Image (cartoon, helix red, strand yellow):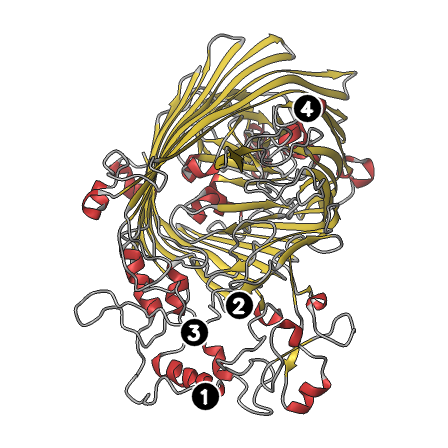
Amino acid sequence: MKIKFFTLFALILTMTAFGQNVDLTGTVTEASSGQPLPGVNVILKNTSKGASTDFDGNFTIKDVPLNSVVVVSYIGFVKQEITILNNDPLNIALVEDSESLSEVVVIGYGTQKKRDVTGAVSIVDSQTLDELKPVKVEQALQGTVSGVNVTSQSGAPGAGLDIRIRGISTNGTNGPLVIIDGYQGDLGILNPNDIETITVLKDAQAAIYGTVGANGVVLITTKSGKKGGKTQISFNSYVGFQEATRKLSLLNSTEYALILNESYANGGQDLPYPNVSNLGEGTDWQDEVLNDAVPIMSHDFSISGGSEKIAYSISGSHLYQQGIVAPKKTDFRRNTARASIKADLSDKIKMNTNVTYTYLDRDSVNDFGLGSVLFNALNTPSTYSPYDTNGDFTLLPSSSGLGIEIINPLAQIENTYNDYDLKKINGTVSLEYQILDKLNLTGRVGFNTSNSESKSFSKIVDYGGKVFDIGRSSVSQNAINDNDYSLDIFATYQNTFLENHNVTLTGGTTVFKTFGNGLYATGYDVPNNSWEFADVSLALGTGGDGVRDVSSYTYDERRLSFFTRLQYDFKGKYLFSAMLRRDSSTKFGPDNRVAYFPSATAGWIISDEEFFDDSNLIDFMKLRVSYGILGNDQIPNNGYVGQLSGEATYIFDDVLTNGTAIGQLPNPELQWEEAKKFDVGLDFRFLNNKIDITTDYFINKRDNLLITNIPVSGITGVFAPGGRSPTVNAGGVENKGFEFAINYRENLTDNLKISANYNITTLNNKVTEVNNSTGFLEAGNFSVGQPAIARMEVGQPIGYFYGYKTNGIFQNQAEVDAHPSQLALGAEASPGDLRFVDVNKDGEITTDDRTNLGDPIPDVTMGLNLTFKYKNIDFTAYAFASIGNDMVRNYERTLSDVNRLDYVLDRWTGEGTSNSVPRVTTAATTNRIFSDFFVEDASYLRIQNIQIGYSIPQDAIDKLGFSKMRIYLGVNNLYTFTNYKGYDPGATSGSPIGGGIDFGFYPIPRTYLCGVNLNF
């Protein structure tokens, strides 16, 4: 009886426990900052019962059954499910989910949820920027976004970077359009820590930008405060030092003398170094100009927060970087100040404003091309000392063997004086008015205004009879004012019809104007031959014509556009978008100012279909397809009209009189380039969203490229000074490729989290049209006096290298006699010389045997990014690879007495000794004519960034008032694996034709960093 009683009592207690309800309270915060999150949904699972958090992140739900589950969700954060075991208050920390399908993606004049996006869109978030620690924003796109390649023009502080989205499509400007918070801007003026997200539009999705979207669009969203958020202060700082990542293998003094003796002996001349025993290693000129432990530092802070109706963010930053070449003469400063305010002026009107002020200061030396500091360092013989016995810079002789352009690089640095300053303010102010519940009207004004000044001073200097000798001092200054503004007015209508038909309609107009002016002046005879007195106002002399050299320019270009976009979906799984933009631009003549740019995208979320209900593997799958026509008006101004920019002379009364004449012949039919973009993609996730895969196949066709060298009437003529043939739309380029990106994330344990991201892009580039008098365009210099070596020609990649193929080395006279004569190239061959291929099989080696020797466009690019986090320790590593890009080695002067790379030690010295490196001689040969001997495979794998950090435990920093304290160590540009002999296999001049010719690119430094992140 007792047993039955206790059993009944236990059953009653159990039923009471399961049936008990509690009042649930709690607080929701952001895990990364500890700040409260207002507006978070806390809902009982499988019911509509719940609450939203208030201003302080608090919530209350009454009468909640024990053992029930609440779902905590907020856009942009990982959803949590919590089982209610008692009535203890809940402290919930939500983690940001940058890969969430509900994440809002900026697509231009609006946003979409990530799951609804039907175009090829990639996103880089602020966490990636924080891990990479880029000096310039562009660097964060390298290896993190498929289809995007970022190349450096120089590793010098503040030097420009080139972004190429899905290849090189034009012989003109290839850089993408940059939109910062809705206005057309410049990436170079931004502090990377001010950026929330970078969105890259790669396909027809960019057609909403019409005539400026052909090269792709980069959309920047800067950080802002959160309404209802408490004030948050953050401070980020790092200091570090830089060094060169590699040195070229040059001959030391003894090796140089032996090679030079052999060269002179083979040429039948006396030995220049009869005794080499006491020469030793000599001077390593690279050590003289490349510096170690060169400082770099960055500091920034931000204050953000808000009330129920206002959100604000204020930030400031300072960056200072010296160069590894001439640190005291090459440095870069960037100071920024930014303010962002969002305010609900009423229930129907919202205001948003972002304003950024930037100050740049850059000093530089000649760091690229013939005559650059590194060019001189590589070619100056190691037998010369930097200084003579008097302590002055050593003068290099102006001999036939050293020429008249190679000078002591240390003297060159000492006598270089350059300064550039830029002050820029830019931003946007917008108002959004909710006309009806489903109809919003937005007005936005964007603006940029900048003033820059630069000054260079040429002092009187004698390098010993060189072309760089200056017998008269001069100072050149310029002042440039650039402005632009845009006015956007557009309306957005959103509605749902018959429950399942969702429509968003956007329409509006854009006015864009850019205008400015520049003034250039040169003065001579600077007082005291000194930088301190280098100012045009103080200069005592004038140019040769008796007046100061002064020039100026002014410009004013405008664009008027109308656009509309329809976004439609049925049941959220059949997606469609159509865009049309009408642009009118003053860059073109009256008959061609207006053009229309249509596009369409579509998507099918296959995983929402009923036949996917039983799938335990795939969580999400979406098929995308897009096609659109976009434009590119990034061409020189006023090409459709004639201008008096040429020179002319005429005899009046037996006196030769100077005058002006027409310059480039006008072309009133000039119009913009047209890009036809096709893309098909597939996105899917599986294994509980741990793996995310995106694939795309694209075809980009560019028509109406601007082509020069057009045949014209001999009566009109284009050969007078300043005269040029007209520019016409007569070229075409096609890019095809495949993109694949895979992301993997998993929490292996409560303490260990990992993520890995890999992407790969293939690219096939081909020129489809060059309709001018020659059938090709050419550019790119090699050595001195040789024809251009890079071409744009039908059937070939744009900018491919054009020269002679070789087939080893002549080993004996019999081989020379059996081979077609090479005399037409300048000298008859001898044993030990390069053997050129008779490509056209006509029995002789002539200029007609030149052919494709490679191109600088990579066939494949890849990025791999790894992140590990164990308890309070985090580790990240980023890598990038480029495969199939070729580069021309052009930093070696052709003169006999210059220093050389040590590969010359493997030269031909007799039959069978070498079949790859020709003999050395001072006699005339064709070995220095441009051939594949100078073209190298510049494929590389670069470890871009490694960083390890430690977050101080919260209980240890609470007393200090910090919500976060993290310290870290990092290395940027750690190592580059490559067989290329030069400094940087990824460098380029930026030119689409001739960009892969290496004159001695300034190397990107390796940077060691130590930093701290603080949140209050």
- CA separation in Å, label 1 and label 3: 24 Å
Q: Earlier in the sequence, mark 2 or mark 1?
A: 1
Residue in the picture at 18% in, 72% down: 389
Q: Earlier in the sequence, mark 4 or mark 3?
A: 3
Residue on which the image places disc 1: 265
Crowdedness of circle 2 by 10 Å Cα count: few (<14), some, many (20+)? Answer: some
Of circles 2 and 1, the one toward us is 1
The numbered mark at residue 593 is: 4
Residue 900: give x, y in percent of width and height: 44, 74
Q: Earlier in the sequence, mark 4 or mark 1?
A: 1
- Residue 850 vs 708, above or below: the answer is below
Crowdedness of circle 1 by 10 Å Cα count: few (<14), some, many (20+)? Answer: some
Along the line of sight, which residue is nearer the eye, 618 or 183? Answer: 183
Q: Are marks 1 and 3 in contact (CB under 8 Å)?
A: no
Mark 3 element type: loop
Mark 1 residue type: Ala
Residue on which the image places disc 3: 249
Mark 4 residue type: Arg
